[in-house]
Amino acid sequence: MDPVFLAIAVFVILCIFLGVRIVPQSEKHVVERFGRLRAVLGPGINFIVPFLDRVPHKISILERQLPNASQDAITADNVLVKVETSVFYRITEPEKTVYRIRDVDAAIATTVAGIVRSEIGKLELDQVQSNRAQLIERVREQVSAMVDDWGVEVTRAEILDVNLDDATRAAMLQQLNAERARRAQVMEAEGRKRAVELAADADLYAAEQAAKAKRVTADAEAYATGVIAVAIKESGLEAAQYQVALKQVEALQAVALGDGKQVVLLPTAALDAFGDAFRMLRGRG
């Protein structure tokens, strides 16, 4: 075989081998030509100029998690707290990450620590504990804005825990117990007040019902009196006397009912009532 032809074949194979780049889905490759950025190769088959272009940086675009970090911070009410944070990010523009920052992990960790201290310094301790979600959101937004020049996207920034020193924790526990005792006293006082109010309402209701009963009785008596007056007016005095005599007879009959062993004493007025009733009955018959 001709040595020249063999050399040419080897050179062509080498050029193909050096010029074809297969990039995995999880990576991006940075291509340089004579030390300057030429292109960023995405996933799939890519072609470069052999011997002129080279690929010095192969950047993973998978999401990454920084090691959990703890930093001290002072709240607005001068309480020292130790904050534990966790950050997730991914590289979106490798050319910025490669040429603008040397250690992106350390840079992000330092940025997060500074922002967390700044945000916690604006809040009191109770607000830090109760507004954890809002605090995390503000930290994430500020971190995202600051690392944008590095071609990095912060996908999540979490505040895992806020720890207190022993003296502050003991003081807070004492304050919590005092607040619980105060609330218990308030609830007990409210209960006694409510019991007194209910008792007063019950007495008022009973008085109102008694007044209503008296009013109904008075109305009934007034109505009966009016009926009698109308009867006297329409039928005359004799009809009224007749009705009264009948009522007297009925009352005496009720008194006489019994087992036959009682003694019934009738006054002279009762006998007269019988006489009047019989005479009126004859007259009407």
Image (tube, rainbow, N blue to C red):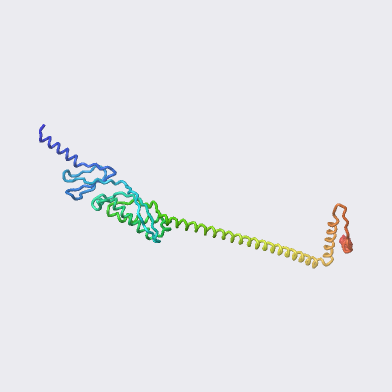
Asked whether residue 40 is in view, the answer is: yes
Q: Could you say which is closer to the camera, residue 59 or residue 178?
A: 178
Q: Is residue 248 left or right of residue 210?
A: right
Q: Could you say which is closer to the camera, residue 66 or residue 170?
A: 170
Percent x, y of residue 145: 31, 56
Extreme top residue here?
1
Identify the residue shown where x is 27% and y is 42%: 24
Percent x, y of residue 43: 27, 44
Q: Is residue 260 left or right of residue 10?
A: right
Identify the residue shown where x is 22% and y is 42%: 21
Asked whether residue 283 is in view, the answer is: no
Q: Quadrant of the C terminus?
A: bottom right
Percent x, y of residue 161: 39, 52
- Quadrant of the rendered structure where residue 232 is? bottom right
Identify the residue shown where x is 52% and y is 58%: 181
Looking at the image, residue 56 lies above or below residue 172: above
Q: Quadrant of the N terminus?
A: top left
Percent x, y of residue 274: 88, 61
Q: Could you say which is closer to the camera, residue 121 or residue 230?
A: 121
- Quadrant of the rendered structure where residue 133 is? bottom left
Total marks shown come to: 0
Identify the residue shown where x is 19% and y is 48%: 32
Q: Is residue 158 left or right of residue 234?
A: left
